Amino acid sequence: MSEIPYKIYLEEKEMPTHWYNMRADMEKKPAPILNPGTLKPVTLEELSGIFCEELAKQELDDTSRYFEIPEEIRNFYRMYRPSPLVRAYCLEKKLDTPAHIYYKFEGNNTSGSHKLNSAIAQAYYAKKQGLKGVTTETGAGQWGTALSMACSYFDLDCQVYMVKVSYEQKPFRREVMRTYGATVTPSPSMNTEVGRKINAEFPGTTGSLGCAISEAVEAAVTQEGYRYVLGSVLSQVLLHQSVIGLETIAALKKYGIKADMIIGCAGGGSNLGGLIAPFIGEMLRGENKYEIVAVEPASCPSLTRGVYAYDFCDTGKVCPLAKMYTLGSSFIPSANHAGGLRYHGMSSVVSELYDQKLISARSVEQTSVFDAATTFARVEGILPAPESSHAIRVAIDEALKCKETGEEKNIVFGLTGTGYFDMVAYQKYNDGEMSDYIPTDEDLKKSIAEMPKV
Ligand SMILES: *Cc1c(COP(=O)(O)O)cnc(C)c1O
């Protein structure tokens, strides 16, 4: 076996001290977010009514290359970072591939995903501003869990609107959040005006991420001392998640490894954006080339089948408009879709990189995603989150291609989290009851036609 260890760890002193903002190196920047009322670029003042001020600044800043990670956040990171970059020797052997496969594992904390990297930053800035608490939405529950942990660390109130279907299907996720002191409300609820409206319009609806976002925003702006925080999509979240990519590139450099291909799953684009950030930076500065692949579910294919246009970030149309690859904010993936990554749009930074062809995208069907998850779990030990398994699917496909060509490609993928709370989905898969639903062109046309004309 080669001299590369199973797990490549950075030492504490090698951990990143700054987040990297790839927008600073982009010649053509992502389009500005717009005020849904005036259709003019959102100002810092307007944004500060919804978000913490420091976070609003980060959101709008597309010129500062680096932001220093505050000492308190770095101390919190030390509790679970650096995360390991693992050489998947066992998977390589199982696939009998000449490819070298590496994965950056972000599931080594109680929230079980990368989301804690941004949650702790957002809670920190809320505390620094002297707020009482924050509101948010959560779909599968990872973000709500991460935020609950971060808020309890800084002694902030945390109100989570959880998509109703997950609230019912994942009672244990809910209990983790409550254990960390959060209040969890199934969405759409009767607590907010937008929730009541959605309930009246769609009786019996099991909710969507877009609805939950609208409720959480309303809850933030109607309570004194509260702001809204979001776990993906936003540029500030990609900024915080750059810690993943910065550690990855440092660990690879430590062993003289040059990545050829980097693969990440894409829901709202935050883990992917964070993982690829410093690699994209090198590409933008003309220093290096990488093949970068975003992987999304075939049932919610925003990059591969969406349109690149301004759209609402939420169903209730209260958030700023973002130019992004989107299926339309009224798109709700089929109920049989189990594997996460349900968001209708995509980070405007990732969208712009995709539009500039700096990254490519593929969509995969959920049964093949669970095939990959199972193969991976059986040889590498970790039980992967369904979301992460989208990246595993493509990493395996690529490694199998190398078997035919004999290429010793270095494949790096993001393993964003663990799947212990997704056992209903695994159960369906194990019982042979999982099916694939791919939206028809007609389905997509309908939600795309409802998009704002900007
Ligand atoms: C939330 C989540 C994702 C998808 O979100 P992105 O913003 O696209 O990264 C992927 N994997 C896990 C484990 C998650 O919790």
Image (cartoon, helix red, strand yellow):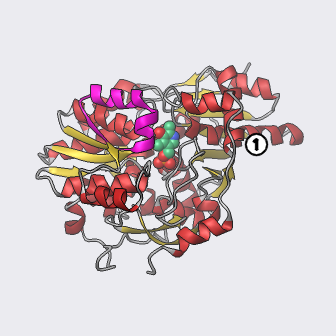
Picture quadrant where residue 317 is located: bottom left
Instruction: Judge whether residue 211 can be spotted in this image.
Output: yes
Q: Residues within 10 Å of mark 1 (few under 14, many from 20)?
A: some
Picture quadrant where residue 233 is located: bottom left
Q: Circle 1 — which element?
A: helix
Query: Is residue 453 on the magenta stretch?
Result: no
Q: Is residue 317 placed above or below 376 in the rendered structure?
A: below
Q: Is residue 438 placed above or below 28 in the rendered structure?
A: above
Tell me: 115 left or right of 149. Answer: right
Tell me where the magenta segment starts and ends, as one range: 162-185
> Residue 21, percent across and down?
41, 55
Query: Is residue 163 on the magenta stretch?
Result: yes
> Residue 202, percent across and down?
42, 58
Which residue occupies the foreground of this view, 105 or 367? 367
Given the image, on which type of amino acid does mark 1 rest? Glu
Which residue occupies the foreground of this view, 180 or 214? 214
Can you identify the residue that label 1 sits on? Answer: 398
Residue at image point 19% right, 67% down: 45
